Image (tube, helix red, strand yellow):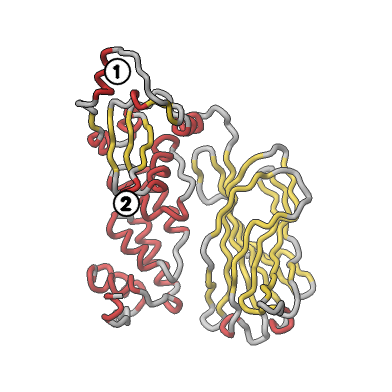
Amino acid sequence: MIKATSHKNWWIFFDRSIPRYYVPHELRIDICVNIRLAGEWSFWSRRSIDSPSFDLNVNGIHSSWNLSIRFWKGPEGKRITNPVVLCLNILNCTVEEVEQARIRFQFGVYNADVNHWEYCHVSRTVLELKSSNDIISLGYRDLSIVDRHLKKSGEVDLMVKIQIIQCESEKHSLSQDMARLLKHPRAADTKLICGGMASMEIPVHSSIIAARSSVLAEMISPIDDSPIKAEHEAGAEENVQEQNGYTESQYLFSLKLPDISKDTTEELLRYIYSDHVDNLDNLAPQLLSLAERFSLQGLKELCERNLIETITPDNVASRLLVADEFGCEALKRAGLAYCEENVTVLNKSLAWKMMEQVNPELFNEVCEAGMGSSRSSNIDDSELSN
């Protein structure tokens, strides 16, 4: 970590790695910025706070950023000092060409009692990067500052991890053309049925589905007794209503996935067609299960990587259970290492009790990794029934 700059009662630190890994047509840039509020927090909580700017100049993007703290107002218009509103802002940006980038960020506050960072949930947004001097707020999180966050000097340390994912603007790349085919299906010959009771139908192409997953290929069944197919084969004139650019008469096959929701199915299809997933932060556990079920190794690796990146004290137990269930060795190693490094801040949860009862071997591995061999999940049995 390198101390980058100081300004009055602020200290800013950078910890940058560029990039950690590559994905086709993407460049990922990871940056960590630590900011210290010097002086008594009681003083800072009486005013709006803007950090000095920090500059990020990478891969043709020249930009200035800052953090700001604002306060909610109560029903009578009085300022509420806890929780505060922590915001991430872009102050200005200069790029050679306008491009889109996916940005993920995660706030943290330092726990001075146990010398460990407490992280908020990951936030994500899509931003059109263009040359501009306009201030853009990328997002905010409510953050409670309590006694454990105050150092003896009264200082508070805050942090933001920023990940910028740039996508190449190849207008006619194979993956982008395939994604357009999914959005505007032509010659779709299969109706995919999903969504449970809602019974959503999505037009897809049997040849693409079969090429990507041998398991799904076996699940595609012909519409043998359909009069629509008979008309199609006989070459009779068709008089059916077009919907979304395709006609009912085009369906020769069906693929039934009634147990999968519409949103999850759409992300699954996005991966099958284009090798990309847009909503991993919310759907990684569900998609990991489907990747295992349908033998989609590439999707499994994407989900595993996302789950590793988003481990927290609250979810590490469930991450370990998922890793063990689906044979994700990298996720399991990351979870065990996290337990070893952060044993003092692991939170009691139902997942630990479940692990202790249904997977005692995994629970013992966690204990050996640093929780202490005699440590129990320490949750009443009554909680299992809630």
At 37% from the left and 19% from the top, the residue drawn is 239
Question: How far apart are labels 2 and 1 at the CA level?
Answer: 37 Å
Occupied quadrant, residue 70? bottom right
Q: Position of residue 124 (x, y in %)?
A: 56, 54
At 39% from the left and 46% from the top, the residue drawn is 262
As helix, strand or loop, the secondary structure at mark 1 comes to: helix
Question: Quick one: label 2 or label 1, which is nearer the N terminus?
Answer: 1
Residue, disc 2:
289
Instruction: Give the residue type that dot 2 points to.
Output: Ser
Using a 10 Å C-alpha cutoff, classify the residue at mark 2 as few (fewer than 14 neighbours), some (14 to 19) or many (20 or more): some
Q: Position of residue 229 (x, y in %)?
A: 26, 22
Q: Quadrant of the N terminus?
A: bottom right
Q: Position of residue 167 (x, y in %)?
A: 57, 40
Instruction: Compare residues 230 and 8 and report the one nearer the observer.
Output: 230
Residue 232 is tagged as 1
Say above or below: 278 vs 141.
Answer: above
Instruction: Give the residue type that dot 1 points to.
Output: His
